[in-house]
Amino acid sequence: MTQNTQSTQDTQDTRSAQDTRSTRSAQGMTVVVTGASGRTGSRVAEAARAAGLTVRAASRAHGFDWSDRSTWADTLRGADAAYLVHPTDVGSPQATREVGELAREAAGLGVRRLVLLSARGEDQALPTEAAVGEAGTDWTVVRAAWFMQNFSEGPLAEELRESGRLVFPAGEVREPFVDVRDVADVVVAALTGGDRYAGETIEVSGPRLLSFGEAVAEAGRAAGRQLEYRAVPGAEYGEVLTASGLPAEETGFLVELFGTLLDGRNARLSDGVTQVLGRAPRDFADYARETAAVWRR
């Protein structure tokens, strides 16, 4: 066996041993999952249950409301860890304020670990990340690339299915789209990893770069239907959002946000999925094949 092969085997053996210890330590853990019915929260809840955790869903349907602090304590009390995803963008002032307040309350109630979902390259998210880091409990930040599932869930998916076209202000910038299932698996590894990921920021992405046009084209090929991508300037997209009924303040925030996130800064790969999970991230082509029915009329 060569030295490199031996080194690789040693790394895999070490990771396997660490994963075994993490699985054992997960037994009996109770984790609060905010947004448990949402795009990431539902996957985190599913992955957490599969890992042997007891999931406490935090949503309005279960008596939790981000905007009503009186609902927080009953949700957090007695939990070991919590996954935090705010319903507004992680970089919004509201997210910074409410995530920070909830993180401090969680620390005061004895919650030992917080994992925050953040966004790669989003400078606006740094105050929210800092608020979690200053709360007084162990923390991990998972910074994710643009989700693959944005094409198949929510307003962009509806637009593609109904009109066969996606209008978006991304130009020809390339993005390493990440599968939300990979994000969820990394989150659960951080929740159950003891000190292994404490105080760490983990960046996760898919395995290759695609422009939005290339991603839409792959979705179309999988669905057996021609799908079109039309790039528009940010100001024009803002008009589209306003016409859809989005408040002016939120529209302005999103236009500014897209102007920075889609300026090319994220046209790079991150190795967080491989480093944490010991496997390659899921590829967009596989996701598109699995999801193709969504884009068919």
Image (cartoon, rainbow, N blue to C red):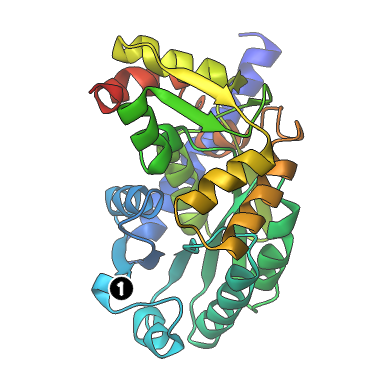
Whether residue 88 sits left or right of residue 60 in the image: it is right
Q: Nearer the viewer, residue 254 or 43?
A: 254
Q: Quadrant of residue 156?
A: top left
User: What type is the residue that disc 1 sits on?
Assistant: Arg
Q: Residue at x 56, y 58 (%)?
A: 89
Label 1: element kind: helix
In the displayed image of the protein, which residue is found farthest to the bottom? 70
Which residue is denoted by mark 1 in the rendering? 60
Whether residue 208 sits left or right of residue 159 in the image: it is right
Circle 1 residues within 10 Å: few <14, some 14–19, many ≥20 = some
Q: Quadrant of residue 195?
A: bottom right
Relative height, residue 94 to residue 243 (above, below): below
x, y (%) of residue 150? 44, 38
Residue 154 visible in rendering = yes
Relative height, residue 186 to residue 64 (above, below): above
Q: Quadrant of the C terminus?
A: top left
Q: How many marks?
A: 1
Relative height, residue 32 to residue 39 (above, below): below
Residue 137 visible in rendering = no
Q: Nearer the viewer, residue 111 or 69?
A: 69
x, y (%) of residue 28? 31, 66
Q: Residue at x 36, y 26 (%)?
A: 163
x, y (%) of residue 276? 55, 39
Q: Nearer the viewer, residue 229 or 266?
A: 229
Q: Quadrant of residue 140?
A: bottom right
Q: Residue at x 67, y 21 (%)?
A: 172
Q: Quadrant of the N terminus?
A: top right
